[in-house]
Amino acid sequence: MGSNRFFKFIGGFLAFGFTFLQGVDWIFTKYSIDNKYFNYILIILLIAFLLSIIILFISSRGVIKNISSAKTKKTRFIKIGNVVLTSLLLLLFVYFFRKSSSKDLLLDDLLPKISKAYDNGDTYYVFKNSIDLLKTYPENEILKSFLKKTSWTVKVDSDLKETDVYVQILRDSSWTSIGKTPIDSISVPDLWRGENSFRIKLINGNIEFIGADNQSGLFEISLLEKLPENFVLKSAEKNIFMFFPGVYFGDDNSWPAFGVSKYEVSNSEYKKFIDEGGYENKEYWDFPIKIEGKNYTYKNTIKRFTDKFGRFGPGNWRYGNYPKGEDNFPVTNVSWFEARAFAKYKDLKLPNVFQWLHSAGLSGFNGFIPELKSSNYNSNKLNEVNYSNEKKLLPNIAGNVREWVINPNEDKYGILGGAYMDNSYTFNSFYSLSPFDRSDGNGFRLVKQFTEDISQDTLKINFVKRNFDLEEDVSDEVFEYYKSQFDYKPYPLEVKLTNKEHNNSGYIIEKFEMETPYKSEEKLLGYIAYSEKFKGNLKPIIHFPNAGAIFSNNDSWFINSSIDEHIHLLDEGYSLIMPVYYSTRSREHKINSWWPNESDEYKETIIKIGKDYRRVIDYIESREDFDFSKLSYTGYSWGSVSSNYLLAIDDRVKSASIFVGGLMLQRSKKEIEPHIYLRRVKIPILHIVGTLDGIFEYEDSFIPWNKLIGTPEKDKKIIVIEGGGHGLDNDIVIENQLKFLKKYN
């Protein structure tokens, strides 16, 4: 141990070993090589070290004999150094062994948890842990697969170059630096059930901007300097699919960036307008104007807009003053004309319907309504303009006062969001009133437009409103004629099973093909899924897709997602039959919307879909491995509203479980009008809906459905989720669907 040769050897081996193992560790990490091979390298290196020590000892025996027995100071230092270096070398081996083992343990521990979380629908857990582990295992295919399944990518850019970008993922309190604009792809969790995934923050010099939940794309942050005080910037949007229940705006709505007032206009703000002669300045007022064939001039009409004692002002004021102590409360009891005049006085505008919907979080194909429990609905008093516990919305945009928008609906004008005395479902419902209406609860907020384009301001809203109680039924004889449209001549049932696939989760997917029951060059195809745990006597459930089937050309993703959503049925011995109906998924698309219309093309589509449905039932009936007596139907959204006629044209279906449906307000040709068919549906049915459904509105769509369906009350299981939107909690669906099927199947 006193050998200087040993000292040099240990020092050199330590330097070599550390450098070598660091390099190998990096390679193993980068390419996700199994760490057991790293441990093999460690063992080989340790053996090499021990052999080298032996060789060194043997070759140094002669030298050792000649070393003086005198313990010089130099010899003591060499001994101490050799002990220290040998200890360091041993610690080096221990460190890398434990590091390697800990990686394996980490992966072995977390991968099963990630897999279980994915099966349980905990998307956020899977996303968070997958993206964290990929920093250590960037090439791990399993982790990349989980991340792909639970995330999507967004692009972020700014109109100011090299803007710093930060992202805050749901439930995280911290912001993560991503880099500088432009950034092509940022992974964010693909969440469901109404949760928001992320927020983007941009910083450029003194400008700091935080986008709305789930907002990405181009941020025109330079416009912040042009915003009035207490205004919020809303970025431009392109090709946005947008609708209200009863209002369809199309698939490609676009609008430029704009600012929206954070608060509703208050009493004190409106008082300044009055005091500065706002009612006397006719330049602020939209007169002359023609409404319902009658001409209105400024001179003759301005007299309508007075308070309780004849002074100019809102209808609930006295002698030109608002109630004492209500400076910061929203102005109410004002007409559309008064709201418009105030906007012109401020050199601002009333929002158009697109701006209001976007500000309220209702733009795009968003079936989820923001949380409204803390909003001011079903109340007996107003809140102050800056009061709100609702973090996701502009204060009081939901409830408090209804807010006028600029767009006309025939001779009325839109007024949105609901008031303090209204039900919460009015938030996402379209309402319009006479521009002269000064009801309690009528208020407004303002927008700042940066362009002169007013095309969307003048857009007339074609709102569909139907009273199904007044709609006539047809006789049974006439209905039988209508129903016969879905008949077809008997022909051989020649079904070709082209694929039988065992997926990795123990479920079997079969693909079937057959001739269509109408003239077509296409095949009627579909998929059947069931668990391999069950043999024979499977209980069949025929499935109808949501509207995504119209916009997708791919079968595989849709089929897999449908199976994932119905695992609870497959695990109970049910089989899910998923036809590819006419004009959906991989078949040629003839329609581009599920919204009804009175065209022959739409009628033909519905009839062919109905024939496909009946022919697939023929096939189900022919299968000996199905318990056909227990045939059921299930559908969500479009699949739910399609049941209105499908369940009436074939009595072989014995029960149905549908979700977030009702009656659509748009008209179609009478011979395919759903309400006529719905009256003839008699089978047991489960229907789960939310009072805040943004697609099939509760009051106008579901309530008429519930009144008209022919199913006896004892066989109707209706579950209304107060405050629920178009997306339902999966646990509620699973629990109630299984109970229902157990009872009736």
Image (cartoon, grey):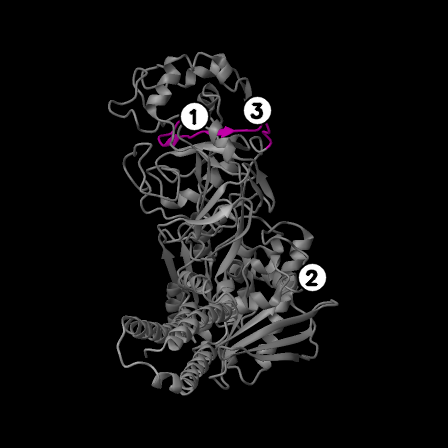
Where does the image place residue 730, in percent across and percent down from the top left? 40, 63
Q: Circle 3 sits on which residue?
A: 293
Residue type at the position of mark 2: Glu
Mark closer to the observer (1, 2): 2
Cα distance between the residues tagged 1 and 3? 19 Å
Q: Is residue 16 magenta?
A: no
Nearest to the observer: residue 608 or residue 176: 176
Q: Looking at the rendering, in which quadrant would you find the N terminus?
A: bottom left
- Counting the numbered discs, the total is 3
Q: Which mark is residue 298?
A: none
Q: Circle 2 sits on which residue?
A: 588
Q: Earlier in the sequence, mark 1 or mark 2?
A: 1
In screen coordinates, is 282 left or right of 254?
left
Q: Is residue 472 visible?
A: no
Considering only vertical position in the picture, is 122 above or below 280? below
Mark closer to the observer (1, 3): 1
Where does the image place residue 411, in percent across and percent down from the top left? 53, 30
Q: Which residues are magenta?
A: 438-455
Nearest to the observer: residue 739 or residue 56: 56
Q: Earlier in the sequence, mark 1 or mark 3?
A: 3
Q: Say which element carries label 1.
A: loop
Q: Which mark is residue 335?
A: 1
In screen coordinates, is 375 left or right of 485?
left
Q: Earlier in the sequence, mark 2 or mark 3?
A: 3
Around disc 3, counting alpha carbons within 10 Å, would you say few (fewer than 14), some (14 to 19), or many (20 or more)?
A: few
Q: Say which element carries label 2.
A: loop
Q: Is residue 454 magenta?
A: yes
